[in-house]
Amino acid sequence: MPEPTTTYRQLRDALRVLHFRTDRKRSGGGHTVLARPGSDRIIVLPTRPATATVWASHLAMVRRVIREPDPRDVELLDQILRGHGSAPVLPTGKQAIPIPAGVTVVITDLHIKVEGPKGKLEFTHHPNIAVTADGKQITVTRPNDERLNRALHGLTRARVNSMVVGVTKGYEKKLKVEGVGFQAAAKGKGVELTVGFADRIVHEPPPGVTVAVPDPTTIVVSGADKQVVGQFAAEIRASRKPEPHKGKGIRYESEGVRPKEGKSFAARK
């Protein structure tokens, strides 16, 4: 049987277009179960097909299973499974980055400067990747499809995009302080933490990052550089990580702490 031209990523993107989602309750053990809401149809795919024959047989099974009344869906899926088309969602690296109004982008050799209302950021990318700007958008390209270049392609595009977003909208991390007597307070440009130790802990923000304490249990870290904001927020959280019994400590606002089940002792006879 000839080598199938369809990749796992192409198949996954096609199924997403057709509203199939991973059923995590039934997935596992080297296979993925895909289901469509409101339908009893499911698709079982191997996470890592052993041979081309196995992969081709699963592609044929998908064609038989997904037969919906809408001919556009069937045509789209058939094109992708036969290798004659591509998923409508482009890979991250191939998506152009629009340049908003008020943002200036200067590219010199491998060095990129992005300046906007929130500040100025700079980045030096890998020599294998090419970055160009025409005043309206930024395009990132790679020389070939080697594994390293594919990885650098998406990485570079993500870094440049985060720079554009950072100088226009900025980034923000919110942390919550949980625990009796635990609190945070502003001290100069930094934050002072009282989290159960003999001494209070003071964190001074790096350049380009600001810290606000709207109330004793909330800390807001903001800035233009996504990596620096995330790193400083992680350092504050590391001062007293949330413990799993009562949840005391510092956590991200959206972070869920799964409580650990306490010990249970059987009644003595």
Image (tube, helix red, strand yellow):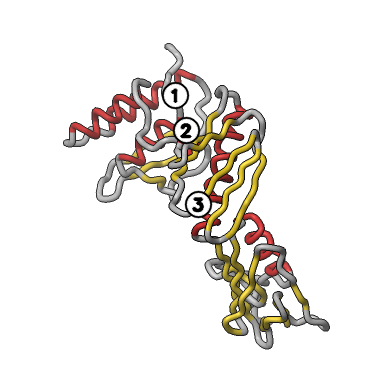
Q: Residues within 10 Å of mark 2 (few under 14, many from 20)?
A: some
Extreme-left residue of the structure? 69
**Label pair 1/3, CB-CB below 8 angstroms:** no
Q: Secondary structure at mark 2?
A: strand
Q: Which mark is residue 116?
A: none
**Label pair 2/1, CB-CB below 8 angstroms:** yes
Q: Residues within 10 Å of mark 1 (few under 14, many from 20)?
A: many
Q: Earlier in the sequence, mark 2 or mark 3?
A: 2
Q: Position of residue 183 (x, y in %)?
A: 67, 83
Look at mark 2 in the image and give the residue it sits on.
46
Q: Secondary structure at mark 3?
A: loop
Q: Residue at x 46, y 47 (%)?
A: 99
Q: Quadrant of the N terminus?
A: top left
- Which callout, 2 or 3, points to the residue nearer the camera? 3
Q: Residue at x 47, y 37 (%)?
A: 134
**Label pair 2/3, CB-CB below 8 angstroms:** no
Q: Position of residue 262 (x, y in %)?
A: 64, 74
In the image, 129 versus 35, the foreground residue is 129
| Position of residue 29 in the picture relative to residue 2 (left or right) | right
In the image, 69 versus 131, the foreground residue is 131
In the image, 208 versus 193, the foreground residue is 208
Q: Is residue 3 above or below residue 94?
A: above
Q: Secondary structure at mark 1?
A: helix
Q: Amino acid at mark 2?
A: Pro
Q: Is residue 38 above or below residue 153?
A: below
Q: Is residue 148 above or below residue 180?
A: above
Can the viewer see residue 269 in this picture? no
Look at mark 1 in the image and give the residue it sits on.
55
